[in-house]
Image (tube, rainbow, N blue to C red):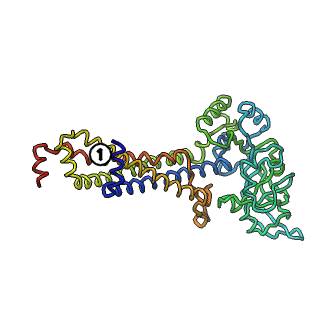
Amino acid sequence: MILFLLKGILRDPSRSLFPIITVTLGVMLTVVLHSWIVGLEGDLVSSSARFNTGHVKVTTNAYAEEEDQLPNDLALLGVDSLLHALRAQNPTMDWCPRIRFGGLLDIPDANGETRAQGPIMGLAVELVRPGSPEARILNLQTALASGRLPEKPGELLVSHGLAQRLHVRIGETATLLGQTRHGSLATANFIVVGTVRFGMTVLDRGMIIADLEDVRQALDMLDAAGELLGYFPGDLYRDESARAVRDAFQASTTPDDEFAPRMVTLREQAGLGDTLALWDYLTSILLIIFITVMSIVLWNAGLMASLRRYGEVGLRLAIGEANGRIYRSMLVESLLIGIIGSMLGTALGLGIAYYLQETGINITSMMKNASIMFANVLRARVTAVSYVIGFLPGLTATLLGTAIAGIGIFRRQTAQLTKELQS
């Protein structure tokens, strides 16, 4: 019967073309928008984890309360012993001590006088320590716009935008002016060895990256760090694992001590939990909207098809075919239409999604004054779910629309069939 119905669909486009086009367009939009939402979510999580939150983060209780102010006077002390304990407890994870700081970057001329000066946002990481994962986590090799990565103490990376604004050249000396952990003036000289472009305005606007030990000496933070970031293998965030690591760590700390270390997961920072929940709601709402809209459209299409096929259904009833059998055949027919439309829509949607994944949409002009850590090029992301998610609205809508429209079969009166056929 399925082969018979399939031949009918292919040989009579008048009753199948419009439903197939409707399903194809709906499924295509579902696949593209789902891939787009997943891409935005992935960029947000990846960028936040690499530069700010980690998969888990350890700070003091007091530092966490004022984190936006970069309160290095409330930083973690005894970091080496804390790192040893964390690496022993979670040996598969990468643990990275970091210091975030602010200040001014001064560029002297040939006479040692200030030639250019500008505010900076600084990040101190382990750049020259052998085996450090920071270059991989921050994707520094790919982000390198000119020069090279630091290989020894006293070397500095400058964001491409800051280098252009201050007219800094590779090999020049730059002086960091900041504040020590105790509040006194801090100065340190560095050699600019490279510029980086991360593709995020908030970072490219005025960021410097220095080696952790250099900044520790400059800010009087020996064996100290503002935060310790933990990363799971493969740099993939797993919320359940993150919560398990956090709970195990918190069980051994003193929550009432403001200088005691405290661990939080990625979803517990910077409102990311609410943001990620919003993405999940958007995906669900997206499916509901498309299923509802396509069901209404296909219901109307089914009603119009029922009018055109009124005589056909009457003839089948007149020769003794049961109402239920006709109804089931129409549902199977709609299922075949849904499968054809879903396959076509998925193929088209994946093509567009792959294009958006590789090319993306550049929104740099909209991000000039941005303060959120978001990529300037928005990309979709094709996942395994992208290959099947379109079939849910595609099949559900066609079956639902036909099921509603086909109810009229059971309302046909057998006694009236002869009169209907004669007319």
Q: Is residue 337 left or right of residue 182?
A: left
- Eyeballing the image, is 234 above or below 111? above
Residue with the most extreme right position: 111
The amino acid type of the residue labelled 1 equals Met
Q: Nearer the viewer, residue 277 or 101?
A: 277
Residue 103, position as x, y percentages in the image = 75, 58
* Residue 309 in view here: yes
Figure quadrant of the C terminus? bottom left
Total marks drawn?
1
- Eyeballing the image, is 49 above or below 166? above
Q: Nearer the viewer, residue 25 or 112?
A: 25
Residue 194, position as x, y percentages in the image = 80, 60
The residue lying at 23 percent from left, 44 percent from top is: 407
Q: Is residue 95 left or right of residue 409?
A: right
- Eyeballing the image, is 239 above or below 164? above
- Quadrant assignment, res 12: bottom left
Circle 1 crowding by C-alpha within 10 Å: few under 14, some 14–19, many from 20: some
Q: Secondary structure at mark 1?
A: helix
Q: Nearer the viewer, residue 37 or 223?
A: 37
- Eyeballing the image, is 78 above or below 315? above
Residue 399, position as x, y percentages in the image = 34, 45
Q: Nearer the viewer, residue 167 or 303?
A: 303
The residue lying at 62 percent from left, 60 percent from top is: 376
Figure quadrant of the N terminus? top left
The residue lying at 43 percent from left, 50 percent from top is: 342
Q: Is residue 193 left or right of residue 384?
A: right
Residue where numbered disc 1 is placed: 330
* Residue 58 in view here: no
Q: Is residue 151 left or right of residue 312?
A: right
